[in-house]
Amino acid sequence: MKNNEFSNQANTLIKRYYSFIKKYLKSKNKKEIFYSEGNKLFADFHYFYIEAKANLYLLSFYNLSNIEENYLHTQNKFFNFYKKEEKKYYNDWIKNEKKEYIYKIVDGFKEPLKCYKRPLSFTLNSVNDPLTDDEISYLKYSFNKIYKSDNINLNKIRTIELTVTLNSLLWNHKDA
């Protein structure tokens, strides 16, 4: 990635960020905008950052050009906004009494697993979040394989590891 390419792509992402925020703040259906456009922008920021690092363009956070500083500042603002909104929508989902279910086919299980239909983007707050019995079984099954133990206590597993494993169940396995 050359300097001009970096500048052009960074400027495009920065413009998309401000356009997204403006649209989001004016929208009557913020949740829909967040999940449709916010998720895409989040992924684009991530991929661009990884590409810039891989091409040795962003080597450090010292002696940055104005565009690099502006890009990183905008990315951080967006990521902080995104995480805050994601948590808000997930907590709203937790409070909702009427949860929908989906069924997933997983190798190693005889029957499809009954899972909650969660928001597209979520991070578990704790193991006390709503989990179906099948989701708990899947988590234990997965961590039994990882740690080669039949005695897994989910309370001792980091929340981020539980989230990633649950996301794997929801998004990487076929619907029944």
Image (spheres, rainbow, N blue to C red):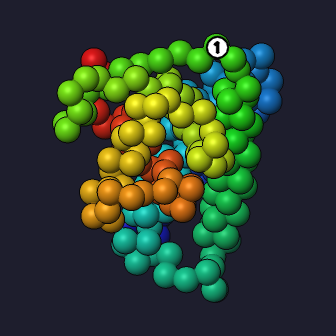
Residue appearing at x 56%, y 56% in the figure: 155
25 relative to 5 in the view: left or right: right
Residue 102 locus on image (x, y percent) = 41, 19
Q: Secondary structure at mark 1?
A: loop
Q: Is residue 86 above or below residue 75?
A: above
Q: Is residue 52 above or below residue 118?
A: below
Foreground residue among 126 and 174? 126
Foreground residue among 74 and 28? 28
Residue appearing at x 32%, y 47% in the figure: 141
Q: Quadrant of residue 175?
A: top left
The answer to whether any part of residue 83 appears in the image is: yes
Quarter containing the C terminus? top left
Residue appearing at x 50%, y 38% in the figure: 40
Residue appearing at x 63%, y 39% in the figure: 129
Foreground residue among 53 and 150? 150
How dense is the environment of label 1, judged by Cα within 10 Å: few (below 14), some, or many (20 and up)?
A: few
Foreground residue among 82 and 132? 132
Residue 60 locus on image (x, y percent) = 55, 83
77 relative to 49 in the view: left or right: right
Q: Is residue 67 above or below residue 86?
A: below
